[in-house]
Image: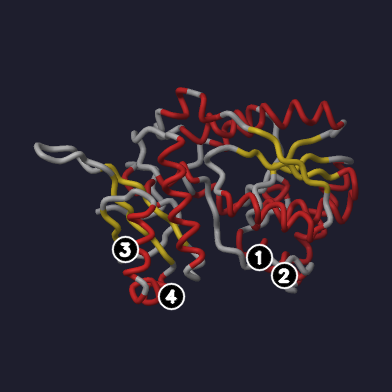
Amino acid sequence: MEAPIHGKLERLRGILRDMGSVLVCYSGGIDSAFVLAVAHEVLGARAIGMTAVSPSLASFERTDAVRIAKQIGARHELVDSSEIEDENYQANNVDRCFYCKSELYRISEKKQAEWGVAFAVNGTNLDDLGDYRPGLEAAKNAAVRSPLIEAEFTKEDVRAAAKHIGLGVWDKPAAACLSSRLPYGTRVTRERLEQIGGLEDALHQLGLKQVRVRWHALEATAGTTGGSMARIEVAGDELMKAFEQREAIAAAGKKSGFAYVTLDLEGYRKGSHNEVLKGKSLRVLS
C-alpha cells in the first residue's frame, strides 16, 4: 500500500478510536463496509453496524450486507425504516434523498441512545462531495460524522485500503437505493421498487455485475394502457455480454412487468438521472 493511503488509514483508525463507540450507518456497500471493518478493528464490540431495511433496499443488497458483516465479525443490526410512508419521499423530487437520510438518521439517533453509542457515522467519502447529494444536508443536521472525509479518503483510496486490510469486497461495484432508478417527479411506490429490484436480481443471476435498471413511464394514449420501460445500464466492459444475453434479459424484464426492455449504449454511469438537473450534473450537458 502506498505511503499516502497508509497515512490516511492510520488517521481513520485514530479518528474512530477517539470516538470511543460508533454506530455505523451500514448499507453493505464498499464505503460503509470499510468504515465498519476499521471501526470493528479498533473498537471491537463498541462498533455496531446498522442497516435500515425498507422497500428501497434490494433483497440481494440486504443479503450481502449480512454476509459482509459476518465476514468482518462485527455486530450487525437490521432495523425497519419507513421513509416510503413520507409523502415528501414518495413525490420523488430532487431532494428525495434528504427525506430518506433524515429518516435513517432519526432511527440512528434513537438506536444510539438504546445501544449506548457515542457517535453515528456514515461512509461518505471525498468523491461524494462532487455529486448532487441532498442527503449530506441531512447528515449535517443530525450531526452524523463522515470519518472517511475527515481522513481525506477518495473512493479509490477506500478500495486500496480495503484491499490492504483484507476486506473481500474491496472491488464490489457501487450500489445505490432502488428509488434512485426512478426519474425525478415519478412517484416512488412499493410496486415500482419491487419491479426494479426483481429485474436487477435477475440480471445479477445472469452474471452481470454493475447493473442499474432505470424505470421510465410510458404515456397512455388512445388504445394503449401505458405501462413502463426498463432502460438497463451495465458496465462498459459488460455491454457485449449483456447484448449476447438480450433474449434472456428481455424475458426477465417482461416477467418483472416491463412493457419494453432497452439497453443503454452509454453503459453504466454514476447518477445518470442527475444528468437532467441543470447545474447539478456530474456530466457536462450540451
Q: Look at 32% across and 42% down and name the residue there.
A: 278
Distance of mark 4 from mark 2, alpha carbons? 22 Å
| Residue placed under numbered mark 1 in the picture | 159
Picture coordinates of residue 77, whole percent (x, y): 76, 41
Is 206 in front, or is 187? 206
Q: Which residue is mark 3?
A: 263
Residue 228 % position (x, y): 29, 45
Residue 108's place in the image compared with 242, above or below, is: above
Label 4–label 2 contact, CB within 8 A: no
Identify residue type, mark 4: Asp
What is the distance, in whole Å, between disc 4 and disc 3 at their CAs? 14 Å
- The label nearer to you, 4 versus 1, is 4
Taking 249 as reference, is 76 left or right? right
Q: How many marks?
A: 4
Give me the C-alpha separation between circle 2 and circle 1: 6 Å
Q: Point out the image quarter for the C terminus.
A: bottom left
**Residue located 34% across and 35% down the image:** 186
Please, what is the three-letter code of the amino acid marked with disc 3? Leu
Tell me if residue 57 comes above or below residue 100 in the rendering.
below
Q: Are marks 3 and 2 in contact (CB under 8 Å)?
A: no
